[in-house]
Amino acid sequence: MANVPTADLNSAAEEISVGDRAEAQFEVTDADTAIALGSGDVAVLATPRVIAWTEAVTCQVVAAALPASETTVGVAVSVEHLAPTRIGETVIVDATLTEVTGKQLRFQVLVTNPDGATALSGTIVRVRVPRSRFV
């Protein structure tokens, strides 16, 4: 680990709490499809794209509470992509912090289609790290 004082890694711990959450909406475009990303041959929302969206929302959950010297990195993703989403439809991506263990942050993620059906559900684990390790 870089020469970062321990206090920097823990200074925001009181502000990051189980239950913290964020939500965002994303419209599916041609660039988001399985065909465009090479993960399939149908023009529906690609699993890799929806995972990227869920990771982005998990970052939003804790971003304001982290000191500038710190960031998070993804270390585990476990999801089920349960329903297709068509081009032009808008999904709602929700991420809720469910567990904090030291520097590890576990999130429940849920993506819903316009009709309310669950498109994706699962967990993402991120770890708090000094930003200097990646610069």
Image (cartoon, rainbow, N blue to C red):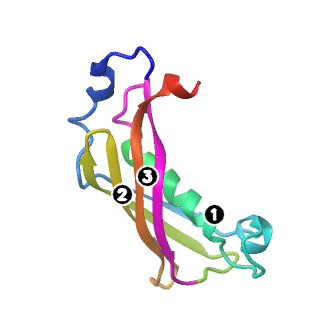
Q: Is residue 7 above or below residue 117?
A: above
Q: Is residue 135 magenta?
A: no
Q: Quadrant of the C terminus?
A: top right
User: What whole-number distance in Å separates the C-alpha atoms at marks 2 and 1?
Assistant: 18 Å
Residue that mark 2 sits on: 107
User: What whole-number distance in Å separates the C-alpha atoms at marks 3 and 1?
Assistant: 14 Å
Q: Is residue 8 above or below residue 100?
A: above
- Kindly identify the amino acid type of the residue bearing the numbered disc 2: Phe
Is there CB contact under 8 Å for labels 3 and 2?
yes
Q: Which of the two discs, 2 and 1, labels the residue nearer the N terminus? A: 1
Residue in the image at 29% along x and 52% along y? 20
Residue that mark 1 sits on: 49
For mark 1, give the secondary structure: helix
For mark 2, give the secondary structure: strand
- Kindly identify the amino acid type of the residue bearing the numbered disc 1: Arg
Q: Which of the two discs, 3 and 2, labels the residue nearer the N terminus? A: 3
Residue 97, position as x, y percentages in the image: 31, 54
Residue that mark 3 sits on: 58
